[in-house]
Image (tube, coloured by chain):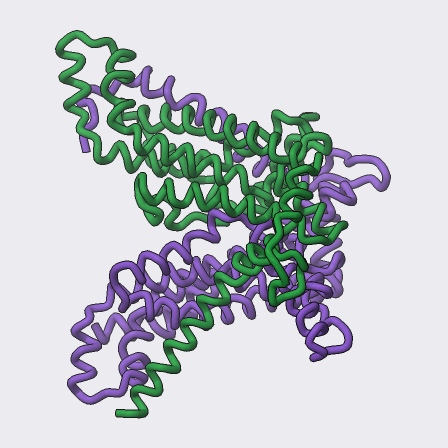
Amino acid sequence: MSALRLGDVAFRVLVCAIILFLVLPVVVTMVVSFNAGGFVLPPTGFSLKWYEIAWSSNEFISGIQVSLILGVSASLLANIVAFMLVLSIYRYNARAKQALTLLAMSPLLVPMTILGLSMYIFLAQLGLAGGKSALLMGHVVLTLPFAFRILTASFQNYDGTLDEAAANVGASPVRTLFSITLPIIKTGLIASFVLCFIISWNDFALSVFLAPSDWTPLPIQLYSYIKFQYDAAGAALVSTLVLVSAVAIVLLDRLIGLQAAIGGSKG
Amino acid sequence: MFTLPVTRGRLAFALSVPALTLLLAFVVAPLIWIVRVSFYEPIAGAYMRPAWVLDNYVQFLGSVWHLQNVLIFTIEVAVLTTILTALLAYPLAMYMARVEGWAKRVLMTVMLAPLLIGLVSLSYGWIVIFRGGGVLNATAQALGLIDAPIQYMYNMRGVIILLVYIGVPYMTLTLLDAIERINPSLVEAAKICRASPWVAFVKITLPLSTPGLYAGCCVVFALNFSAFAVPLMVGAPNTPMIGLMAYRQAMEINNFPFAGSIAIIMTVASAVILIGFSGVMNKLFFTRIGKAV
């Protein structure tokens, strides 16, 4: 019996160690960002100086601006396009549904290295590489599968007879869209927008191929900062980024459940 | 689910046009183009010339250095990190399968959060911990435990730590799914027959969760084999991983044909390995499970 207990205790300790491994980098970064002594732990005192440095840095502020503009416009576009595609497949019975679904999910099926590389080489051929529009289109394509998946799920719980009823009492398709369809799938749309935004906001792998040198999103700025300078201001900035992600995580969890939102995505 | 009984062909098509255009222009066309470019003739200093030559493939496949130090090396790294990931993910998935309520919700959030936090932030955390002058070294030096900082980042150690770190959530979620499908009365029955938890694990949970293990290993292997962002961020500048090599050829050396051929070789190698793996798994496990259940 005691051998059994011991085994169970060992198992729990092992599990705790693995969980610690998973949360450690985020926790340490947070602690360092508030630590007056920077990287020397245990913490010597509470300080906001790293945040002051980070938030007054021109590079970071411009990075935040770029990432905001990029994230909002990419997720808006991705959601509009994905919404139209979902309408086409599930409301209007488009042909070749499976092919359309496969195509919509294709950016997730191709390894990021191949996707970024081929996009860059192709856009370079067209003379578009290194432009803002290339980066924007890349982010739209990157986030599209996520929007498509969430909106598909919303539509699968959607009672289409409501649309028919609206049509029967004389509502135009546009009126039906705004008075019936959109209000009903509102939650899915908001969740989809949040998810697409946060994926674009944090993206490194695609941006590193497509970002113009004079219009770099925050993760790329942060990457070059870490490479060349090394102080705890980076930790303050990462903590800020993590905070934004945390808000998105809470929102997604409340809206449609975290697992439904990102089950099976790739980083 | 309800769809309108009448197929409104034209409207349906019109609504799918924006998505179709985007995906064809920015995913499908680039993928076709990169195959074509891999047969182009690169010109040193200039750009490249349209041609149908195999030089770029020969440059990689015909060189022992490339095969051993890049291809085989990357396979080794991917296999090692996949095994380490599975070793860490298994106990976690076993534990998650048996907890309920808030503990499960917290663990689920811990698993899913890294997917949303983003690679740079996560890498930064490890860099803070491991870099010379980072938390671990600075603290150890302050305490007088070590004289000189130990370098964990910007070499293969860092790459392996980070690949495993990123892989664990994927693997755990896939394993959890498989473990939760196992009929709990089987483990119960083993307990009644006085099997120790270890025996119950080896005889029941482990074999019945192999489909999940297999799926998780395939995903993690494929991701790690083609990884370029992780070695770029925490590896040495000349880390010879195949994905990073393709990235450098395209972005730094501007040799698009060679980058293209490396990408194709990478894709084919990954597919061949995964198909081989599925054959081995079929022979070893799945037929036996099929008989047992």
Q: Nearer the viewer, residue B118 or A42?
A: A42
- Which of the image's four quarters has the N terminus of chain B? top left
Output the letter for the chain in purple. B
Q: Is residue A258 left or right of residue B134?
A: left
B212 in relation to B38, above or below: below
Q: Nearer the viewer, residue A82 or A181?
A: A181
Image coordinates of residue B279 in percent, x first then y, are 42, 66
State which quadrant residue A40 falls in. bottom right
**Which residue shows up at 13% across the image and 9% down it?**
A169
Q: Nearer the viewer, residue A146 or A123?
A: A146
The reply to whether residue B261 is visible in this rendering is no
Image coordinates of residue B118 in percent, x first then y, are 53, 48
Image coordinates of residue A217 in percent, x first then y, are 63, 36
**Which residue shows up at 78% across the image and 44% down it?**
B253
Image coordinates of residue B274 in percent, x first then y, are 48, 61
Output the letter for the chain in green. A
Q: Residue furthest right?
A: B45
Q: How many marks?
A: 0
- Which of the image's four quarters has the C terminus of chain B? bottom left
